[in-house]
Amino acid sequence: MSARMELEQRLRLAIRDSQFCCAFQPKVDIRTREVVGFETLVRWRDEAGDIHSPLGFIGLATELGLIDPITRFVLNEAIRSIGALDDAFGGGKAIAINVAAKQAGDLRFMRSFVDALEASGCAERFIVEVTEDAFIAKNQFQTQVLPMLREAGARVAIDDFGTGYSSLSVLADITADEIKIDRSFISNIHQRPRSQSVLKAMESVSGALGMSVVAEGVETFEELAYLLAGTRIRYAQGYHFAKPFYLEEVVRTNGARGDERVRPVERFRPQSRGAAAGRAMRSPRRD
């Protein structure tokens, strides 16, 4: 059996047996250091207990038409986790969920997705992250799905902007609340003057269109320092602030009281300049 066939078979069994879990990546206000939200990231916990990054299976799941049950699992886990996240970090934080471009244009799937959001009673807490492909493809996302999400109260973010054929021109035709600048664009931004100019243009256009900007993959003190000094960007994600975490890592029980918490400010204190730079040299960020 080929490696691909074996992986496909294992993935089908994983979906059948719900061998998945979720990690949460904090989104931070870089000027106040406040955690303002989380991105929900799926992980595959296989039969041996090993954890697999989505980079190793999401593409295959999408290709095989197996992505829908995985996305439903992530949505259900995110909804189920709201209480624990609120206990650990305070209420009202936004929760983002990734939806593949192919799914975003699937009216039947998205109706069930929106129904689940509405049934949760807190649809306004959710941000649906899609790549710009979903907006520019000739499908039903812009005309029918986006209005459904708006009516439910959910927000929409353009994910991974700055990759592929991304261009500022597509923003004029997109109705979104947030634009997330891909981590490949943010990496070493302090050393890339041309990229700095493009980033400022992205920021300017997004602001004019009423979209907030999030810098993804901030890993070093120098990258953060540039964003603070050279831009008006308020929000970021990345290893400089925190790795994706599991709920059990931030919520502890305390005997009968059961209310001892890991203080978010302590848990997600940014690393020192030296520590952040050293870690970035050792291991790049991977979702």
Image (spheres, grey):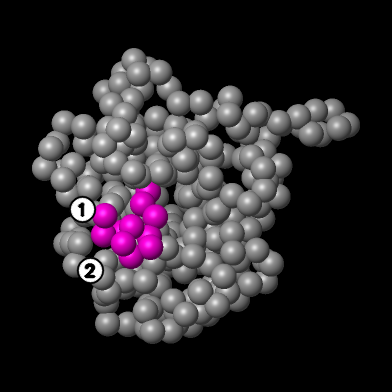
Element type at marker 1?
helix
As displayed, is residue 138 above or below residue 257? below
| Residue 79, quarter of picture | bottom right
Badge 1 crowding class, 10 Å Cα cut-off, few under 14, some 14 to 19, many 20 or more, is few
Query: Residue at the spot x=58%, y=25% of the render?
Result: 266
Q: Nearer the viewer, residue 255 or 49?
A: 255
Q: Which residue is drawn at 26% across and 23% down?
A: 281
For the record, the magenta segment spans 204-214
Residue depicted at 38% across the width and 78% down the height = 141
For residue 74, above or below residue 258: below
Q: Residue at x 55, y 53 (%)?
A: 94
**Nearer the observer, 156 or 108:** 156
Q: Is residue 238 visible?
A: yes
Q: Name the residue under label 2.
A: 170
Magenta stretch: residue 98 in it?
A: no
Tell me the quarter of the picture where residue 134 sits: bottom left
x and y percent of residue 133 in the render? 28, 69
